[in-house]
Amino acid sequence: MDEMLGLLRVRIPRGRNLAVRDVGRNSCDPYVVVTFAHQANFGFWLMQKLKTKVVKNNCNPDWNEELTLSIKDPSLPILLTVFDKDTLTADDKLGEVNIDLKPFVEAHRMGLKNLPDGCAVKRVQPTRENCLADESPITWNQGKILQDMVLKLQHVESGQVHVQLEWIDVPGCKGLAHGHAPDTM
């Protein structure tokens, strides 16, 4: 279980309509933290935590960042949390959402090859569980499977984060085709 299957590139281009936390400026200073935990040998949990830059004074930030996680168990969700950076006090949470990798993994395991760019492989519909704001297409583009999603932040009055997932095979790793099968497949 502790062998890396490959890498997951998480692109975070932008956030929209984030909650105001700096009332005097009617704005916020948002950044995103992406957290992925997996169980290692002997029952210990290992955590990867990556974050974007802070965009000052903007409730509609453009981060345009790529974060890369090493994946050992694709059945586990990724936690995406948005914070408001504060100088004198603890950072305020602007919401969070779990990203379910299972539909993305299922599409990748179809073993598709040589499709036209932009071809939709699968479409994931919004549900209460997946926090999607809109339909999330999983598409073939330049030999890769990508999933674009707009996620509604939870535990906050407003806010959405745009995210794109891309799998990266790593030489010497098993990859998704032979990796740990998600429980619901």
Image (spheres, rainbow, N blue to C red):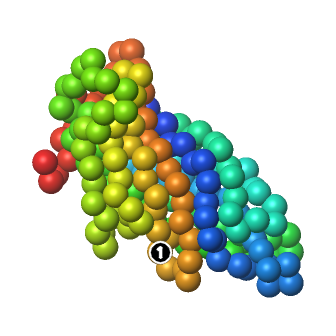
- The quarter of the picture where residue 27 lies is bottom right
User: What residue is shown at x 39% (from left), y 37% (from top)?
Assistant: 146
Q: In terms of secondary structure, where does tag 1 sit?
A: loop
Query: What crowding class fits label 1: few (fewer than 14 Cα within 10 Å), some (14-19), or many (20 or more)?
Result: some
The correct choice, above or below, for 182 with respect to 18 in the image is: above
Q: In screen coordinates, is 26 left or right of 125?
A: right
Is residue 32 something one can see in this rendering? yes
Total labels: the figure holds: 1
Q: In screen coordinates, is 18 left or right of 44?
A: right
User: What residue is shown at x 69% (from left), y 52% (from top)?
Assistant: 62
For this orientation, the residue located farthest to the top is 171
Near-viewer residue (155 or 128):
128
Near-viewer residue (99 or 146):
146
Is residue 40 something one can see in this rendering? no
Percent position (x, y) of residue 138? 33, 42
The residue under label 1 is: 154
Quarter of the figure that contains the N terminus? top left
The amino acid type, in three-letter code, at marker 1 is Gln
Q: In screen coordinates, is 85 left or right of 51?
A: right
Percent position (x, y) of residue 80? 51, 59
User: What residue is shown at x 68% (from left), y 49% (from top)?
Assistant: 63
User: What residue is shown at x 73% (from left), y 79% (from top)?
Assistant: 21
The correct choice, above or below, for 149 with respect to 178 in the image is: below
The correct choice, above or below, for 185 with respect to 61 in the image is: above
- The quarter of the picture where residue 41 lies is top left
Percent position (x, y) of residue 112? 22, 25
Percent position (x, y) of residue 53? 73, 50
